[in-house]
Image (tube, helix red, strand yellow):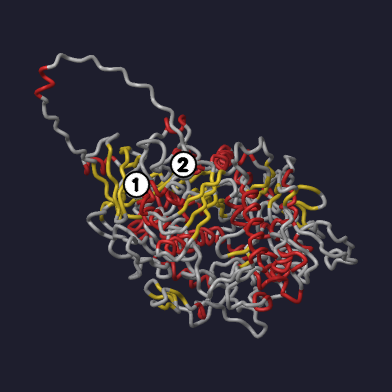
Amino acid sequence: MTNSYTDIGVSDCILIMGSNAAENHPIAMKWVLRAQEKGGTIIHVDPRFTRTSAKADIYVSMRPGTDIPFLGGMIKYLIEKDLIFKDYVLNYTNASFIVSEKFDFKDGLFSGYNPEKRAYDKATWVFERDEKGIPKRDDTLQNPGCVYQLMKKHYARYDLDTVSSITGTPKADLIKVYETFATTGKPDRVGTMLYAMGWTQHTVGTQNIRAASMIQLLLGNVGMAGGGVNALRGESNVQGITDMFLYHILPGYLPHPNAALENLEKYNATTPKTSDPMSVNWWGNRPKYIASLLKSFFGENATKENDFGYGWLPKFDVGQNASWLNMFDEMFNGKLSGFICLGMNPACSSPNSEKTRKALARLDWMVDIDLFENETSSFWKGPGMNPKKIKTEVFLLPAASSVEKEGSITDSARTAQWRYKACDPLGESKADGQIIHELYMKVKELYAKGGGAFPDPILKLKWDYAKDGKVDPHGVTKEINGYFLEDIAEHPVDKKAYKKGTLVPNFVFLLADGRTSCGNWLYSGGYNETGNMMARRDKTPIPTANIFPKWGYSWPLNRRIIYNRASVDPNGNPWDPKRAVIKWDGSKWVGDVPDNAVPPMALPNGKYPFIMKPDGVASLFGPGLADGPFPEHYEPLECPIVKNPLSSQRINPATPLFSGELDKFATCDPRFPFVGTTYRVTEHWQTGLMTRYQPWLVEAEPQMFCELSLDLAKLKGIKNGDRVTVSSPRGKIWAIAMVTNRIKPFNVADQIVHLVGLPWHYGWLVPKDGGDSSNILTPTIGDANTGIPEFKAFMVNVSKEERPKVEKKPDPKAKAKPEAKPEPKPAPKAETKK
């Protein structure tokens, strides 16, 4: 997320796409409505008319899985109508860079594609460079090989007729959205884009975000107050856990090493480099961050002689992918023996949930750490399961809730805020950190006694987070911030002296020689010698940008708007003075924390503003992704049309495919003629574990339901409130039909396509007769870059549930007896739960 929540309130135009912010992100929506009150326009693009749509000035519908055509059509519109912010595009993006002559794009495929590996060799996705290694440019943007012209050619195919035919959005609605959002491509106008799972949960999810980023760059909206591309997270700390680790990264987005990088020298050799003196290339500091991280992990055991313990880090096999879908596929195939599930309910949240549940049955053991019993911990006694035939030994460890523990959480806007404990954990429940601590201490004890194949990573770990056996959240957070590990007489940054054991001021002070530690460089500065910056609650704003720099702590360096040096012209003057984020006063920056303190690019020693990019500018041509440098439309794995109207590549050619016994899918199969999509409702939370036990919330949303249009209900003979069966190639569930005018059929490629909307909060365990997870229906397929599953577009059928009629035969003996009075029912017996 580039911006803060609060500066959304100064935007002129808010495009909400892939999100139902009013129902699922009410704090974000609060600021959207503030902008509307000041004259801003809200645009909502969504397959369903929701509460967000009801608040929007413009609402248009769109078939699930067709975001790139919708956005690609806007890119074409902006270029064709010459509505781009030219000064911004020329100075701050790679629009003028000359691409290699060997680069090509034909029939949906970029150059270098290997169909057997379903992967690209990106050797041709490069720029022509001069003798100094700096990309060649054409500032006139006329060279046919420059990024701007290649982009123009690529999206020339995304004309209004084609986009309308793919998305099902009427041309008049497309034009209305394009015209309205295009008005922000001026210095005194700014627009923002808000998205959530509706953009990410596709085989092209990452490219959906890329397409949005390209539009915002063409319009000059990145770095601006009220601008940017902003992710609305579905949990209070999703941003925080992402910053700490995912399957392919170490804390702070450092790449996870693979087996080919067997020593620290080879790992550091992968650090991004630049030849341009005007590029900051902040990722060039990676050696400082990995060395400080290793010192945080292994303490005094990490020395220069042993690469600071780099050899103790686990390494992926080259090409190995440890994403969610692959992990459960390996589990299903019997290649995993154990599984620790921490605060998740994959028996309901995973796609193709029947496969997930059967995968859990093939483990030797599973530990589930959660607040309550759930479908994952109880999978062995769920529908279709025979406990006598399941070998998995299940342990359910009771965890503490958020109000029973202290520590920081990081919201969508990258703002870490300190949360205090309201009460101690109830019963035998414990905080997650405490559980992990006790688990580690026991594992360490076993290794110390019995050795093992590779004991060093366990026995040499630095682990001093607990006092009297209790984890200290302040100690953990200080470790994340980082320490000076030796006395430093004169630090190269500020020429000051620092004592061993003091907290580093921030990540600028980290060193690559082992004299500093840091658990996550992005959070360095959040808890330093000044104090706990995350606990701050000062509401003093920067009024022009509507940001609050003294409330909590935003990474990096408390910066509230990322790439804010792009909010000024090359001389340092704000493009839009009335919404100034920062300004160069002749000697320094004033306002928000600048995205690096170097002068603006037109001044002596000035630098480009996009400091995380090796070339210093933003990428309209982005060669780093798995599926292409430009976003291209591919249909979802399951779709209602036989052919992709834009090419012969029906689905994303770089997306891994699963072909196991339960990985069934269907396209244009008459048995599954309707498009299904999943979503959240306000009354339930995620898989419902924290809400389905609450009687007042169950009363509000008691059972699994599905939304149908009036047309589809008439076609299938279904009435509002009927119990129906929804099926896909992977399974079926029952649901209560909600027949509504909020969903309309789509006209796609001259055929009528119907939509079935399904919430995903339900599960078989509780409440009784509440229904099961809609993820029983969703396919095993994910994004080509991240692996996030494609929950938002798949094919289903829906039919009225026919309940068998049971004929009661009269009992001759009963007729002879006088009518008996009904006996009172016995009082229910108390249930005991093991």
Q: Describe residue 266's horizontal placement relative to residue 821 as left or right.
A: right
Q: Describe residue 525's horizontal placement relative to residue 681 as left or right.
A: right
What residue appears at the point 76 percent right and 74 percent down from the top-left corner?
304
Q: Give the residue at mark 2.
A: 688
Q: Assess disc 1: are there few (<14), some (14-19) or many (≥20) residues with their C-alpha within 10 Å of its C-alpha.
A: few
Query: Is residue 749 in sight in this rendering?
Result: yes
Secondary structure beneath label 1: loop
Q: Describe residue 577's horizontal placement relative to residue 30 as left or right.
A: right
Query: Is residue 171 in sight in this rendering?
Result: no
Q: Which mark is residue 763?
A: none
Contact check, label 2 and label 1, Cβ < 8 Å: no
Q: Give the residue at mark 1.
A: 383
Q: Nearer the viewer, residue 812 or 66?
A: 812
Q: Earlier in the sequence, mark 2 or mark 1?
A: 1
Q: Quadrant of the N terminus?
A: bottom right
Q: Nearer the viewer, mark 2 or mark 1?
A: 1
